[in-house]
Amino acid sequence: MSLLEVKNIKKSFENTRVLNDISFSMEKGQAVSIIGSSGSGKTTLLRCLNFLERPDGGTITVAGEKLFDANDMGKVSEAEIRRKRLHFGLVFQSFNLFPQYTALENVTIAPRLAAKEQNRLAMDEAAIKERALMLLDQMGLSDRTGNYPHQLSGGQAQRVAIARALAMQPDILCFDEPTSALDPELTGEVLKVIRGLADAHTTMIIVTHEMAFARDVADYVIFMDGGNIVEQGNAKDVIDNPRQERTKKFLSGYS
Amino acid sequence: MFYTVTISLLEGFATTLKLFVMTLVFSLPLGLIISFGSMNKLGIIRYPIRTIIWIIRGTPLLLQLLVIYYGPGIIGGVNIWGSGDGGRMFAALVAFVINYSCYFSEIYRGGIQSIPVGQYEAGQVLGMTKSQIFCRIILLQVIKRIVPPMSNEIITLVKDTSLARVIAVYEIIWSGQAFIKSAGIIWPLFYTGVFYLVFSGLLTILFHAVEKKLDYFVV
């Protein structure tokens, strides 16, 4: 059984169709890359998975549990949505770190609030901090834990954001163009971290414009255009030998 | 004479200070509630509140004081404020709270709406509740952004309290003016300016300290 199964997801804004019957599935431990030109619906798809947008149709199933069913919505409570969205983590293009908190606090705030709600904060506090420090160390930021976001470079900020998302232990970690706001040098350090996560078999969906990276790191690639999945398959196959004309045209812009 | 005047002005200034502090105590939280109303998705809540804000910001506070103090008596036939000093003070307080809540609400609204939507979304995808996001993520960023406009408004309030004398609240200007009639001297009235200056100077120092305190992060 697949870890994630997305079926017939549709989404329109006003009268514009943004997602047109999107279906795909992925296994645990896989890294899936979504590529395509701007406006093709990649980001909207990620936002649907993270419950930041509500699809007009379709279903989303994780590990056999139907998280979203367009035919069966409306009665889902806010608390339910909060629980469901924790299957996913999301790393934003613009980091969205909390400016008033240090790197460490950015990573611990959500687990601390979750523990507090269950009246377990006193019990879990030390473990939460330890895990956050471990994650920041894994991101190569052990000397930056006490810094505030404005004291970090873009690459460092994005790595804090990755640690922050991992702290909630999502089943699937989503990246929405994680390096689009970074210069090439900083892009390299973030991609290195994501590559490390892939090597450790972290289940990930990566929306990216870095074709070489998608080819090397992702197991599977989905090419989207105009709200449709045009082509999908093994990453190297799709990127090296695209079959569809539209994919060829898109990829030719990169070589 | 100088001593007598100073004591008399200090008494007036106590009333000024009382009106100032009480207005802040009530209008700072009320303004936040009004700002939520003015941003409400439902037009049935949003439009009436924006209309009230428009009326309050669009008319002089002096006029509002008179309407609130004399209005109930003229329209309903009963003076709900009573006849004593306390009643006039209370009417003045009501007028000031309404007026300043509306101004504060617009400052809050500006501050809240200036926070990037990504801050809310980052909180959401981390599983935080709406109130956790507001209290833990948004609020401090809003406070940092609104300290300068707030300090402006609050320093204006110090001086606006002098309008309360129109309904015979014995604040410091009233005390100073009284010496014109009683002793034929005008300098006590000018001397009241010193009290305002010292007090707004202290507030300026306080707001600088708050700004400095929030300097550790950048929004």
Image (spheres, coloured by chain):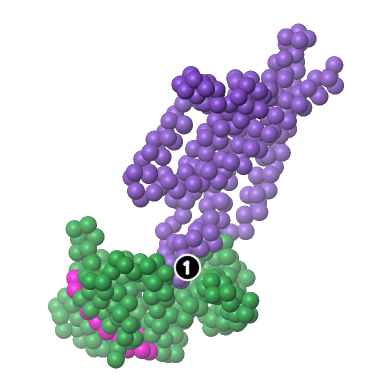
Say which quadrant the N terminus of chain A sits in.
bottom left
Relative placement, left or right, of B163 versus A12 is right
Q: Judge whether residue B209 can be spotted in this image.
A: yes
Mark 1 burial class by Cα count in 10 Å: few <14, some 14-19, many 20+: many
Residue range of the region highlighted in magenta in the rendering: A20-33
**x, y percentage for residue B219?**
52, 56
Q: Mark 1: which amino acid?
A: Met
Callout 1: SS: loop
Colour that chain B carries in the picture? purple
Residue at image coords 58%, 46%: B147
Measured from the top left, where is residue A22 in percent x and y?
22, 75
Near-viewer residue (A207 or B180) = B180
Image spot of residue B116 (x, y percent)? 44, 57
Whether residue A152 is situated above or below residue A219 in the rendered picture: above
Q: Quadrant of the C terminus of chain A?
A: bottom left
Q: Who's the residue at 38% across and 70% down the image?
A: A81
Residue at 59% over, 68% down:
A102
Q: Colour of chain A?
A: green
Q: Which residue is mark 1?
A: B128
Inspect this view and state whether residue A195 appears: no
- Queried whether the magenta region covers residue A32, the answer comes back as yes
- Of residues A192 and B81, the one nearer the viewer is B81
Identify which residue, A22 or A93, lies in the foreground: A22
- In this rendering, the answer to whether B131 lies above or below B185 is below
